[in-house]
Amino acid sequence: MDTTTVTMKATDGSEVKITIPTEVPSNERADYLLALYNEYVHAVGVTGHWKDEALGICLPELAADVAEAMDFMGALVDLRSDPTPEVEAFLKAQGLTETRVNVGTARNVAVPKGYSWIYSRGYWAHGF
């Protein structure tokens, strides 16, 4: 999401810089992003709370939208991995049908072959 920084004057006269989005999604886009988040993103932090660490697992063609959905929900994306021909060839040669993610507290999480994964330290970790 694109942002801009504006300077405003506080009630005490001091100047405060605030970062705001330059465009707000339509209601339809917001509903779409929420639906993607609910379907593809899972809490993986030790608390199990939706504001803790999150991991999205989806097909590569949805990965950009799922990453946008995570950002929209405050789970700003920290890492993203899309399948590469080298990884896919290795999995095929080994007869494997999945890879494993080990990031943050997401330990040994299965990701099906050909899928992308998107990780966020979470809403709380990003200071929301």
Image (tube, rainbow, N blue to C red):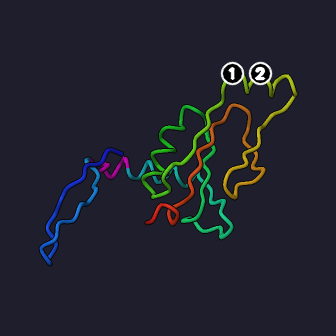
Q: Position of residue 50 (x, y in %)?
A: 57, 65
Quick check: 126 left or right of 121?
Answer: left
Quick check: 126 left or right of 44?
Answer: left
How many labels, in total? 2
Viewer-side residue, 42 vs 30: 42
Residue range (magenta)? 23-29
Which numbered tag is attached to residue 64? Answer: none
Say whether marks 2 and 1 touch (CB < 8 Å).
Answer: yes
Q: Position of residue 27 (x, y in %)?
A: 33, 52
Which numbered tag is attached to residue 89? Answer: 2
- Circle 2 sits in a helix, a strand or a loop, which is it? helix
Q: Quadrant of residue 98?
A: top right
Q: Position of residue 79 (x, y in %)?
A: 57, 44
Q: Residue at point 58% right, 64% down?
A: 52
Q: Which amino acid does the dot numbered 2 rest on?
A: Ala
Q: Residue at point 60% right, 68% down?
A: 49
Residue 11 on the magenta segment: no
Q: Residue at point 82% right, 24% down?
A: 92
Q: What residue is disc 1 on? A: 85
Other-residue count near label 1 (Cα within 10 Å), few / some / many at <14 / 14–19 / ≥20: few
* Residue that protrudes farthest toward the front in the picture: 14
Q: Position of residue 1 (x, y in %)?
A: 36, 45
Viewer-side residue, 38 vs 122: 122
